[in-house]
Amino acid sequence: MLVKAAVLRSGNGPFSVEELELSEPQAGEVLVKMVAAGMCHTDLLSRDLPPEFFAGPQVYGHEGAGVVEAVGSEVTDIAVGDHVVLSFNYCGDCTACSKGRLPYCFNFGAHNMNARRPDGSSAFTDTNGERVGSHFFGQSSFASHSLVARPSVVKVDPSLDLTRLGPLGCGIQTGAGTVFNTLGVEAGSSFVVAGAGALGLSAVMAAKVAGATNIIAIDRHANRLELATRFGATETISAPPAELTGLIHEATGGGSDYAFDTTGNAEVVRACQQGLHNIGTIALAGVGFGDLTFDFLSMISGRRIVGVMEGDATPSEFIPHLAQLNADGQFPFDELIQTFPLDQINDAEAASASGQVIKPVLLFE
C-alpha cells in the first residue's frame, strides 16, 4: 500500500514528507494506522552523531498511537480495530528479557536502532524503488501507516483519546518510570530533577503522585520552571552547575534522597550526585557523550548511581497504568503537548529545539 511518511535523508538535513510503498505484514507484525506520534530527542540523535553513523534514509518515530488495520499470521492477541500505543521492541529471549528487564534487552540495537527488521529487510521503499529504513524502535511511526513488531504494541482503552497517548511510549514513560520503578520514590522523600523538559516534567508529576515532600526542578528556562511548579515542584533552581550542589543541600536540609538527570551534562550530573545525602541515589537518563567522573570518596559513603532506559517499564502494564492516572486527573502529561500536522514536522522539531514546545505531537488526520 502507499503511505505518507516523513523521511530523514541525511543526518543533518530536514525531514521530507514523501509517498512510500509499505510491504505486507510479516507473521509477527501489526499494521497500524497512525493517529498521532510524539517527537522525542531520540528521533533526532543523528543530529548529534558523526555523519558516518547515519544509517541512510529512514522513517523515524517511536511514540506512535493508532488503530490496528491488519495483523500477521502469528499475532493472536491483537485484533483489527484495537486502539494501541507503540513503545520499544525487544527480543524476549535474552537474559535481560527473561528477568523482565525489557528495556535492557541484550539485542536492543538489532530490534530498535538498525533501520530494518532483525532479518535485514525494510518495510518501506520510495517512488524510485529504493529502500527506506523502517522499524525504528520496532515501529517507525512518522508514517500514516506502519508495520509494527508485536512486542512494540500495547493495547489501550478505546475510550481514551489517542492524540494524547503517543508520548507514553517513550519520553513520558521514561520520566514517570524512573520515579515509580527505578528509584521507587516514597512518600515524604526529597527528589531533584535536572532538566524540565518532557522527561523531567513527567518525573515531577510522578513524584507528586508518589507523595514526595520536596520536589526540586532545575532548568535554565524560566517558562519550564513555571511549568514544573504548576505540576508539583516545591522549589525551582536556575543556576550554573558550580552552584547547584550548595543550592540542593540548602533546599533539602542536607542532601536529597533521590536525583534524576535528564540533561546528559556531566557538570550537572556531578553537582546533583554531590547534592545527594550519604545514601541517596541518582538515576541517569540524559544522553551525554564523553567521560563522566566522580570523586572516589563521594561513592563509598553509600551513594548509588543507576542508568535507566524507558523507566524500567514493562510497557504492556505501565502504559495503561499511566493512561489511567491521566484519565483520573492525577498525571496531566497531556498539558505538555502541542500538536502539528505531519507536513509541519520540521516546524515541530524547531519548536522543540528552541524550548518553545515541551512535547510536539504529529497528527495524521
Image (tube, rainbow, N blue to C red):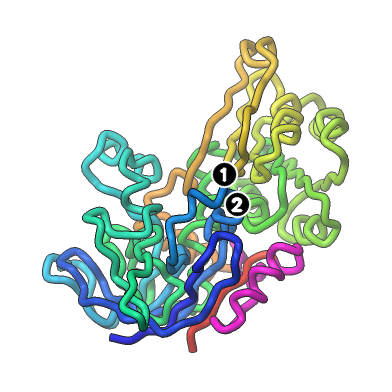
Mark pair 2, 1: CA separation:
6 Å
Q: Is residue 354 left or right of residue 363?
A: right
Reading the image, the residue beneath label 1 is: 179
Which is more N-terminal, label 1 or label 2? 1
Tell me what residue is drawn at x 70 percent, y 69 percent. 350
The three-letter code of the residue at mark 1 reads Val
Q: Position of residue 233 (x, y in %)?
A: 75, 51
Tell me the SS state at disc 1: helix
In this view, the residue in front, 288 or 182, is 288
Q: Position of residue 342 (x, y in %)?
A: 54, 81
The N terminus lies in which quarter of the figure?
bottom left
Considering only vertical position in the picture, is 244 above or below 162? above
Q: Are marks 2 and 1 in contact (CB under 8 Å)?
A: yes
Q: Quadrant of residue 252?
A: top right
Assess whether residue 100 is covered by the magenta stretch. Answer: no
Tell me what residue is drawn at x 82 percent, y 46 percent. 235
Reading the image, the residue beneath label 2 is: 206
Considering only vertical position in the picture, is 135 above or below 313? below
Tell me the SS state at disc 2: helix
In this view, the residue in front, 173 or 132, is 132
Residue 162 visible within the image: no
Q: Is residue 121 left or right of residue 288?
A: left
Residue span colored magenta:
330-357
Label of residue 22 in the image:
none
